[in-house]
Image (tube, rainbow, N blue to C red):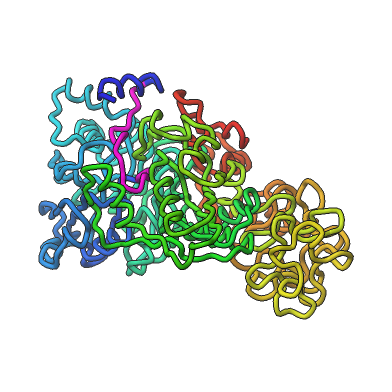
Amino acid sequence: MSAEELSGLIRSWADGGYYNEGAGREDLFDKVREECGVFGVFGIPDAAALTYYGLHALQHRGEESCGICTVESERPFESFRAHRGMGLVKEVFTKEVLDGLRGDRAIGHVRYSTAGSSALANAQPLVFKYRDGDLAVATNGNLVNAPEIRAELEAAGSIFQTTSDTEVIAHLIARSPFDFVGAVKEALRRVVGGFAFLIMTNNRLIAASDPNGLRPLCMGRLSGGYVFASETCALETVGAEFVRDIYPGEMLILGEGDEIRIERFAPLERRAVCAMEYIYFARPDSDVAGINLHAARKRMGARLGVEAFVDADVVTGVPDSSISAAIGYAEQTGIPYELGLIKNKYTGRTFIQPSQELRERGVKMKLSAVRKVVEGKRVVMIDDSIVRGTTSRRIVNLLREAGAVEVHVRITSPPFANPCFYGIDTPDRKDLIAAQMSVEEIRKAINADSLQFLSKEGFIEAVMGRVGAAGAIGAGVAVGAGVGSGAAGGVGVAGGIGGAGGVGAGAAGGVGVAGGSVAGYGAGGVGVAGGIGGAGGVGSGAAGGVGVAGGIGGAGGVGSGAAGGVGVAGGIGGAGGVGAGAAGGVGVAGGIGGAGGVGSGAAGRAGSAGVGAGATGGSVAGLAGRRFDPSVLDLKGLEAAGLSPAEFEAALRINGGMCMACFDNDYPTRIDFGKPSRTCG
């Protein structure tokens, strides 16, 4: 597709010329790609070295180029010290380079280009001279109306030095009649897209997030200063304490005394974190919007085990992003998890494939099947997404060549059918296999014995901390198709309770190892009149401790009834509580229990902090630890936006607080973040 054709296509998609210059690139592993990550330091000595380690932790977000810019607070009007280069962080920054980047304030960047070519001129941070001194800008995201703003600025006399969309922000700031903070605010109001900005002058640092929070940005505290990062894993790497996420439409200004000044450049709107952050982009040890990625991906795999069970011998994940989900699928179904695929991490990031034959060989260089694991086995291959389908076919064939007798593909996201214009490098829609083929046609194209995607509803519930259908409990607990499903009170139609350790394994009266194994289909269920538990309860020990004294529901079973409520008389409770452990989230519609329930009422969402006990369960506090910290809720912003706390909480629940446009958008219409996904409202 020519540049003119692409421009015409995007102009038909929305008013204002929305675009994604990165569209059409092909990656060896056929993945959508996140273009960059940012890291900032304020008020901490040797900020460059700290930024180096932070960028190293964010390397997965961009491998083409990187850069660091520093300034000293004691000599704020000296020129910025900056260094940028093409390649990985460890290649670009030597000890000698870092020694030359003195200062206690810094911003850094790792880049994969979506808007603008892969060239040193486009490496960030971009550094400029302007009326008040030096200006440095680093961003994660895409400014989708940048072409129109750029054309307007060029017509007014601006001269651009790069093809990066980020440069328009610097020009808007420089041309503004307002002071620096006012100029930044005005510039951010002009641009449209998904972005997280770090903007630094000689004496100030600003961190800002787009009005819907599509791109993650968080703040940490370290040694009396502050750090900012695209992911919490970078905070962990440098030893910083997580403070909070930067809220949608919010600016944090540092450098005006000891206090951090908080401003809004946009009203508080619905939060819509990019769904691909949870599926693929972010590292599994990161938390995005309060949700741990490893735990969320395990829940996605577990939910796939409920929705798309298949009888097989081995579960394996495509490394690295699908390993967590494969573990969740294995725990849910009881099918053993094995390392059936091994990734070679040392082949280099720029392996060249000048021909189809060498491209196929390149896959084998980067990925190998473990013959002794898959030979003669029925294999469930878990992957996070299918973009063009080319890599899925190669990996399926790789497993078959290693001797797998069946290969069943399970995808932990809904079908990826729409391009993204908010900062993800995606192909044209005609190249997205899910936009052109049915699931059965895709199955044939990738040579799989079966293929199923995670439903949109299942994906949202898994990210939000809920797993299961027909009354399944918690997350990562091996309940097959639900506990208590079936007239006889059998446990688990799709695999029973058990697998590795079963339920209550090792507990007095526990069920699992001796009864109701993975093969316990239908009549082979566990527990008839006595329910599950006895003295040991369900899952006592490693499984997460559901119920101690009260057992689960007695004759009522668990999950009886369409609402998914738990228990009849005793419910789930006793001393043990619900979801104590990795599950962390129980309650779908009516919550659990009655007066003493968890987050009783519609706000019954269990967060990492054991959400909303007692009377607070129906307020914004019912999202503690899951979305926003109520102790720092922006009530002023709510008032300015004309929203009550209850209305804001309801807005957060739309699509689980995520942008789902790539899975469910009436292409080529404009995304309306205020509306739920058509099938997930």
In the picture, the quarter occupied by the N terminus is top left
Q: Is residue 18 magenta?
A: yes
* Count of labels in the image: 0
Q: Position of residue 446 (x, y in %)?
A: 46, 42
Q: Quadrant of residue 614?
A: bottom right
Query: Quadrant location of residue 52?
Result: bottom left
What residue lies at 36% left-to-right and 61% top-to-bottom? 343
Viewer-proximal residue among 594 and 668: 668
What's the magenta region?
16-33
Instruction: Considering the whole magenta stretch, tell me its main secondary structure.
Output: loop
Residue at 25% x, 48% y is 358
Residue 19 x/y as whole percent: 33, 29
Where is residue 277? Give x, y as percent: 44, 48
Task: Give the residue drawn at x 58%, y 41%.
Answer: 456
Q: Tell whether position 383 is magenta.
A: no
Q: Position of residue 347 (x, y in %)?
A: 25, 59
